[in-house]
Amino acid sequence: MDFSYSDEQRMLADTLERLVADASAGSPTAPASLWRTFAELGLLQLPFAEELGGLDGDGIDVMIVMQALGRGLIRAPYLGGLLLPGTLLARLANSAQRERWLSPLLAGESRLALAWQETASRYDAQAIATRARRQADGWVLDGTKQVVLAAASADALVVTARLDDGSLAAFLVPSDSTGLVRRDYATLDDQTASDVQLDGVALPHDARLGGDASDALEATLAQGRAALCAEAVGAMQVACEQTLAYLKERQQFGAPLASFQVLQHRMVDMHLSLEQARSMAILAAASLERPAEQRDYRVSAAKAYCGEAARFVAEQAIQLHGAMGMTEECQVSHYARRLIMFDHHLGDVDHHLEIVSERLTAA
């Protein structure tokens, strides 16, 4: 199988490499300015179909973007503020809802966030306790959402809720809605997340997106997991590069650490984990258009392997740097935190290994 990029994908990768280098050097780029640059380059439109105002990019195109963001530790909410809510919106919204919410999102004029995760459900997207009650003039939502990425900067939330008939629905909830209370905090890897309380939030009839949201939500989360795998690969690559550079520079007993065979073996193990994770990330990105059962099996396998590889690379990078690897001044510590937190977004290793195990047992 040919894994080489097309000419357009190579141009995209080169452009992103320069963008990430500029954003990572010197003074930090303001989030609003960086988001405008994303819009001007077409990165916000890339994952969406042409008929929706997008550029019809596929899973590999998104992988290129996320891998570059992982390499630069760019904290723009590309996943939480664009890909997850935008994908669900694109799958469920009618033309009026797309015009009101999706078009400004792709133009960089507004942001959204997907609120799906709950404490009791953990990583199960179908175990939703948030309720939506129909009223004469619309809907009323009650419930709590946890770890909503990019909610602090979102103009509206896409919220999943269970209807009285047991079906799953998605609703567009403006961030300033009465009864919506948000608690913002920083995660271990310096991203912004929020816990959201919905207490009698009243919405009009047209706030609901489409019909049953179950299948669309699973497809959306699959795309998010594939994107996360690509981001982790980018971060792992830099962690390996920085660790190798440190071993070549640091000396002990009059010789560079890189000359010690036992440390060479550990670097080889890190690179093996990186390359195997890269292969699994490609598998996930290339499987997004497959039937749901095949897609979810492959994406879960990739997320499980990349989670183990990310933790291994992070731990090895810290250990090979010694005590300084834990300090804020050492750049590898920031990559290690991102890699460790990767496992906790959209399902950890245990969750996805359980899915893989169930599919293998049923086969």
Image (cartoon, rainbow, N blue to C red):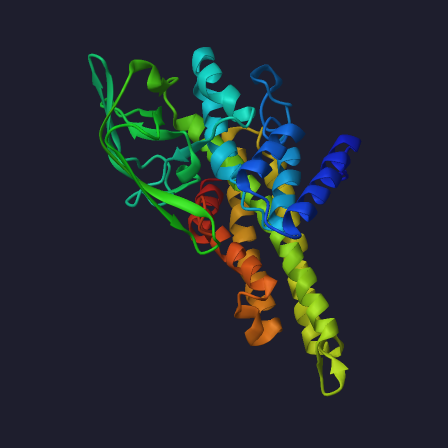
The percent position of residue 346, horizontal first and vertical second, equals 45, 43
Q: Is the N terminus in the top left, top right, bottom left or bottom right quadrant?
A: top right
The answer to whether residue 175 shows anywhere in this view is yes
The percent position of residue 138, horizontal first and vertical second, equals 25, 16
Report the side of 243 relative to 333 (left or right): right
The percent position of residue 259, horizontal first and vertical second, equals 76, 77
Q: Which of 73/59 is in front?
A: 73
Label tally: 0
Q: Residue furthest bottom?
A: 253
Report the side of 203 relative to 283 (left or right): left
Residue under the image location 60 percent in, 62 percent down:
331
The answer to whether residue 146 shows anywhere in this view is no
Q: Quadrant of residue 93?
A: top left
Report the side of 91 relative to 167 (left or right): right
Q: Residue furthest front?
A: 27
Residue under the image location 66 percent in, 34 percent down:
61
Q: Is residue 133 above or below residue 279?
A: above
Q: Quadrant of residue 78?
A: top right
Q: Is residue 324 above or below residue 107?
A: below
The percent position of residue 75, horizontal first and vertical second, equals 54, 46
Q: Is residue 303 above or below residue 318?
A: above
Q: Quadrant of residue 362?
A: top left
